[in-house]
Image (cartoon, rainbow, N blue to C red):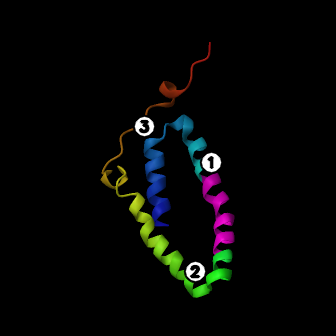
Amino acid sequence: MLFDVNLNSVQVGDTPDALRSRVAGAYTTVNYGIRPLGALAGGGLATVIGLRGTLTVAAVGGALSVLWLLPSPIPRIRTLQTATPAAETAPTTV
């Protein structure tokens, strides 16, 4: 929940109006599309090492997942710039 609220704020503030639905659609496709693979991996891991071990791996992995954000510019974002109007970003046709 916390991730989704923050992500939506950044997406809305940083994505031009003309591309907002495409960005949201791509994110949703990847987010919901990867879940069945995670379920299969979790089930396979539980079969091999047991439920307790799988939950431990998931907890440690979830806690360590923040590490990839540390070197990125995301933790330093304090304000969002106004997105460029759609007319300026839309491709011109001849």
At 43% across and 58% down in the image, what residue appears? Answer: 6
Range of residues picked out in magenta: 28-42
Q: Which residue is mark 2?
A: 54
Is residue 86 toward the left or the right of residue 46 in the image? left
Residue 90 image-quadrant placement:
top right
Q: Which residue is mark 1?
A: 25
Label 2 close to label 3 by CB (< 8 Å): no
Q: Give the distance between the C-alpha atoms of the residues marked 2 and 1, in whole angstroms.
A: 31 Å
Above or below: residue 57 compared with residue 26: below
Q: Which residue is mark 3?
A: 83
Q: Give the x, y percent position of residue 88.
A: 48, 25
Name the main secondary structure of what is drawn in magenta. Answer: helix
Amino acid type indicated by mark 1? Gly
Above or below: residue 19 compared with residue 31: above
Label 3 close to label 1 by CB (< 8 Å): no
Res. 6 mark? none
In the image, farthest residue toward the front:
48
Q: Give the x, y percent position of residue 51.
A: 61, 85
Q: Give the distance between the C-alpha atoms of the residues marked 2 and 3, in whole angstroms.
A: 43 Å
